[in-house]
Amino acid sequence: MENNATLRFLKNLVKIFWSALLFILYGWIVALINLFRENADARRRRKFDKDLRKRRKKPCAPKCAVVNAAVYKRADPLIYSQKYLMEQGMSVTWNNPDIQLYKNGTPVTSSQLEMDTDYDIVATIYNNSTQAPAAGMPVEFSYLDFGIGTAKINIGSTIINVPVKGSPNHPVNASTTWHTPNVAGHYCLQVDLQWSDDANPKNNLGQENTNVGKFSSPAVFEFPLHNDDTVTKRIHLTADCYTLPKKLDCKEKPKKESSRQKYKKLRKLKRIIPPLEEGADWVQALNRHGVGNFPIPAGWSVLIEPQQVTLAPDQTEKIKVTLTPPEKFKGEKTININGFHGKELIGGVTLTASS
């Protein structure tokens, strides 16, 4: 009997030992997984911060003090930025939804402007930060000859205060007066937000295409393609039919996901997402706006001449685009032309043909 009791005691002791060991091992595995995730997040954030420092050309000194991210907050002023959205894999329109022109207080379409006339340019500016405002931010207005990569001509600037996202006065309008050129042609407005300590400086430049004067054939467009860089570039031009879709109804928006689900999706995107935008549903955004989702429809012909061109530094080439609709087509059709050097977006134009 004594031997049986001793044997049962030893068996129970072994069970307790193995249970304790498995519990410890499980805790270690969970801790290692969490540590791996934290290290991956830290590496991604360091890579993003390094990219920002390179763009600002202000590398951190070797012995500079590091302020904890929980204490130091950055504003993120933004406007609809075609280049940034294209970098994230989105299709874009070059008729900017955040830039509106007015004549004598009445909104006008940018494709029917008059020569030698005053127009008010009003840009809607947002802040993606809920904790840091952008006080005293300069906003610069300029225009380019309508085309891709052409020289910038200054219009004017103003200074605005952008409150945090969600506040009663958000978003904010910035405005200036533009006296259009006295020569008919195609022009491109630009609004540039100048904020040195920006959480994401890539979304600060917005562009709006304009037409000044009338054209003899609305289905034939010509514009200059210019290389303003110091190196030779081989540029290819593409066309799509993207237009801004309607906003999603609240009932159509997906349910909130756990941080783990969002983390997995961000990893699949293989892109550097700014910290303030990690909570956005980038997968749904790519499904609604992704490049390649808006091909030229059947029956339409878009002829780009030339479609690929090699430009030396400061060289310009005239591009001709002919839009041919299907037989018996009535109405308007919008076509976007984008120029790329490899994967780098050089610029683009949005053309509208009517019949």
Image: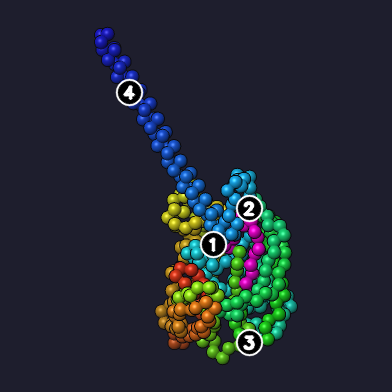
Secondary structure found at label 3: loop
Give how far across and how far down residue 324 sits, in percent: 46, 85
The residue indicated by pointer 1 is: 248
Which of the two discs, 3 and 2, labels the residue nearer the N terminus?
2
User: What number is the disc on residue 74?
Assistant: 2
Foreground label between 1 and 4: 4
Tell me which amino acid carries mark 4: Lys
Choose between 198 and 239: the one closer to the eye: 198
| Image quadrant assignment for residue 142 | bottom right
Tell me which amino acid carries mark 2: Arg
Whether label 3 touches label 1, CB < 8 Å = no
Mark 2: give few (<14), some (14-19) or many (20+) Cα within 10 Å: some
Which of the two discs, 4 and 3, labels the residue nearer the N terminus?
4
User: What number is the disc on residue 15?
Assistant: 4
Asked whether, in this view, residue 320 is left or right of residue 9, the answer is right
User: What number is the disc on residue 184?
Assistant: 3
